[in-house]
Image (cartoon, rainbow, N blue to C red):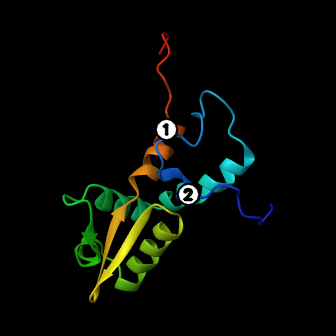
Amino acid sequence: MSKQPAVLTLADLNGAEPCCTPLAERRIPAETAAMLAPAFKALGDPVRLQLMSMIASAPDGEICVCDLTPAFELSGPTISHHLRTLREAGLVDADRRGTWVYYRARAGVLRQLATLLTVEASPTS
């Protein structure tokens, strides 16, 4: 498998235009699949999926790492590793404020991933 970077990046997915046609409608190009795979892989871990849910559903649109860590029976460095994976996959943004880091979901990226997985109900379903 090639280690060449994809032409698109997840940063390109914050626009209003969909990145790709839903999987159920058309095969996605190899470049798009290579760009999106790290995000899906990051969400494939139960802890990261829970963290993503907590971040995306935060009442103020962002959440402090100090509020995330106590929700798990994991060490701080382990939580930091999972959060870094979500950041590197382009799913969250982070801002340091003093000693704490605040995380925000990248809503545009999440919408694009959801669009890709959209399946319209068929009359026989």
Helix, strand or loop under label 2? helix
Q: Which mark is residue 10?
A: 2
> Of all residues shown, which one is farthest toward the bottom?
99
Give the spatial CA distance, label 2 vs label 1.
14 Å
Q: Is residue 55 left or right of residue 26?
A: left
| Amino acid bearing label 1 | Thr
Residue at horizontal 57%, vertical 33%?
22
Q: Name the quarter where the N terminus is drawn.
A: bottom right
- The residue beneath circle 1 is 115
Amino acid type at circle 2 is Leu
Q: Looking at the picture, how far across and down is residue 59, in whole percent?
A: 19, 58
Where in the figure is residue 75, as x and y percent of width and height?
35, 83
Pointer 1 local density, CA inside 10 Å: few below 14, some 14–19, many at least 20: some
- Residue under the image location 30 percent in, 76 percent down: 73
Label 2 or label 1, whichever comes before in sequence order? 2
Give coordinates of residue 6: x percent, y percent: 70, 58
Identify the residue at horizontal 40%, vertical 68% (top origin): 93
Identified at 28% across, 89% down, the residue is 99
